[in-house]
Amino acid sequence: MKIGYPCINRSIGCRGNRTFRLGSYSEERLIATVRENLACLAETLSYNVRHNLLFFRMTSDLVPFASHPVCSVDWQTIFADELLQLGDYIRENRLRISMHPDQFVVINAKDPGIVERSVRELAYHTALLDAAGLDTSAKVQIHIGGVYGDKERSLQRFIREYERLDERIARRLVIENDDGRYTVRDCLRVHEAVGIPVLFDRFHHEVNSSGETVRDAVGLAAKTWTESDGILMVDYSSQQPGGRRGTHAATLDSDHFALFLAESAPHDCDIMLEIKDKEQSALLAASLAAGDGRFVRPPF
């Protein structure tokens, strides 16, 4: 079991997701921005290793506008050495990496233009992980997408579009249950059709489920992961007290997290904390998991 947080470390003084307006695009500006983002990513990963936070979601903004037609920079060649060095560091320190494109990536959309743009964005994410030399346990997570008034047809449309993807993209994708449309049970139907792994989102399951217990849902999702996929990935959060239903917590609820550790046993999983104070909650979660036999501790 590895524990981590997404995209930004608030303690180290840099942000690896710098971008700029499309109207101010230039090759020089893109190259400078990517160089700064990669340097911050290296600093973030170093912090994570020092604090035994071995699961990290890389930001989609490492290369701004990478999937946009305006991007004329061969960033994969320009930054080949830096990306391979990052990949070497990730492997040497047994970090687990994931990525999560934004909500505009919808491959089951009825609009072919949205599907085309979504596939371009997934190709960028895949190319980034490939350029770092990471194996297929480094995943790109997406949602099934919209319902469009007909859930069954929308499920089938996802399956059809997934089967059309380049194999280099398809082998990295995982789907997660969401908080309003597709449950774990729906995701399992897609897995049964095309073999895509199911990432379990604990908070989404609390808000939107088909009636399974957390323990049962974790077990069902875990069975969808193969050796080449790595162990089950889990997104974890809890309800923000006083917030609208479905609002992610600002900081870790220790009792709720301890309950999830108990509920998820004996299944091994890597836990991504989708909690607003990021590495601070991840540090607390790691301390709470210290007595769990599944939790990874150095030396390896």
Image (tube, helix red, strand yellow):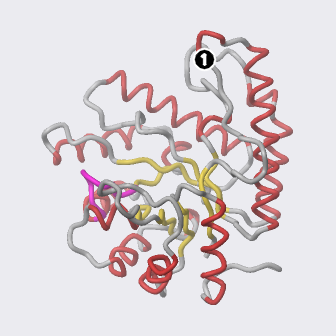
Whether the magenta-drawn stretch holds residue 134 is answered as: no
User: What type is the residue that disc 1 sits on?
Assistant: Arg
109, above or below 214, in the image: above
Along the horizontal axis of the image, is 84 left or right of 7? right
Q: Position of residue 250 (x, y in %)?
A: 50, 59
SS of the residue under disc 1: loop
Along the horizontal axis of the image, is 105 left or right of 192? right
Please state which of residues 227 and 44 is positioned toward the viewer in this rendering. Answer: 44
Please state which of residues 165 and 289 is positioned toward the viewer in this rendering. Answer: 289
Q: Position of residue 275 (x, y in %)?
A: 52, 59
Along the horizontal axis of the image, is 239 left or right of 23? left
Along the horizontal axis of the image, is 131 left or right of 265? right
Q: Quadrant of the N terminus?
A: bottom right
Q: Residue at x 59, y 15 (%)?
A: 22
Q: Which residues are magenta?
A: 176-184
Q: Residue at x 21, y 67 (%)?
A: 210
Q: Residue at x 52, y 42 (%)?
A: 169
When asked about the image quadrant of residue 207, the answer is bottom left
Please state which of residues 146 and 32 is positioned toward the viewer in this rendering. Answer: 32
70, above or below 300, in the image: above
Main SS, magenta residues: loop
Where is mark 1, residue-wise? 21
Q: Quadrant of the C terminus?
A: bottom right
